[in-house]
Image: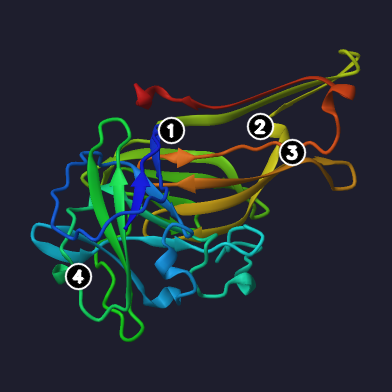
Amino acid sequence: MKRCNMLFAMVLCLGMLLCSFVAYGSDSMIQKKTLTRDVDSVIISGSIVSEMIGKPISGIRVYAYNDGKFEPIRYQIDERSEDGDWIFDGGPIPNTDLRNGRFDSQDTLSIMVEESGHRAAQAAWTPGYKDCSEIEIADPVNGQKSWIYVLYFPFNPPARSSLRPYIVYDYEHATFETNVRKLEYLITKDGKHTTFIKHRWITEGGQRKENFVDRMKTRITMKFLFGAMSVTLNEEGVNSNELAYTIGPVRLIHRYEQYRVMPGGIKVMRVVTDTYEYRNTSVIPVMINIPFEPDKVVTSAVLRFGVDHNEKAY
């Protein structure tokens, strides 16, 4: 069995659940699910699901044991290239030519923790599989646990979960929607899909409430040569465009570029970011790589990003 330790990290309002490996014995008795979390995502590194490495992704299925039934759950496998970059299916610059169709150690498996279940005896597992990984999900705060099962079927794999995906994306109209929220991004007159939110709604029972976004704000101030020179930018001077995306039942991964255009159409201060959209939350990890010693050129740099809400938000 592989054990998943849930590492709680608030990013906006998302508790991301990550996994690590631990050996276990041969006990296969049913054990009751005690985990009560219900909004977290579980991101499992391919290296943890070692039994699946090298297997065709088309034959992999994920199950959980709930209410006396061993049933398929919604899951998503995101492939990475050999150098660790995401494989993107859509957008202006997809890279599907790097996909090999097999589950590799650098790939990831994602689920929503609410669908995990009890620990199931092997006799309950769906027949026809050749290999199986039992994944234990544990909350490090209180020790609560739940389980999922990753099975490989070499022939005639069973149907996937018939439940609606957690997230649906419409690239043409730059909108994505879950059962609790919907976002629409601004598309420029020349067709660029920006990172700027045009509308944001909270939904209840499938019904959309009123938009509560006024505008997104970007404030960048950089000083050079001990303040002798300075550059100030806001959202009106920053361009952005979606380069690629991949979408599955659990999450949406966007790749965006943001930049400023100088005379002659030259892009400067270009930044490429990957954003992750889940049912309830957005995750935007940031890593800054500067290929020189910035303190020799830049005296200070302040970057602020935020959203102004309208009166409907209150």
Single out the residue that lies furthest toward the top: 227
Give residue 151's position: percent from left, percent from top: 31, 70
Specify few, some or many for label 1: CA neighbours under 10 Å numbering under 14, 14-19, or 20 or more. few
Residue 260 seen in the figure:
no
Numbered circle sitting on residue 289: 3
Q: Amino acid at mark 2?
A: Glu
Task: Write down the quadrant of residue 39 in the picture.
Answer: top left
Dot 2 corresponds to which residue? Answer: 235
Q: Secondary structure at mark 2?
A: helix
**What is the CA distance from the residue labelled 4 to the residue labelled 1?**
33 Å
Quarter that holds the C terminus: top left
Tell me which label, 3 or 2, sits earlier in the chain: 2
Task: Write down the quadrant of residue 273 in the picture.
Answer: top right
Dot 4 corresponds to which residue? Answer: 125
Quarter that holds the N terminus: bottom left
Instruction: Give the mark toward the camera: 3 or 2.
Output: 3
Numbered circle sitting on residue 9: 1
Up the image or down, 92 lies above or below 155; here it is above
Specify few, some or many for label 4: CA neighbours under 10 Å numbering under 14, 14-19, or 20 or more. some
- Left or right, residue 137 beside residue 242: left
**What is the CA distance from the residue labelled 3 to the residue labelled 2?**
22 Å
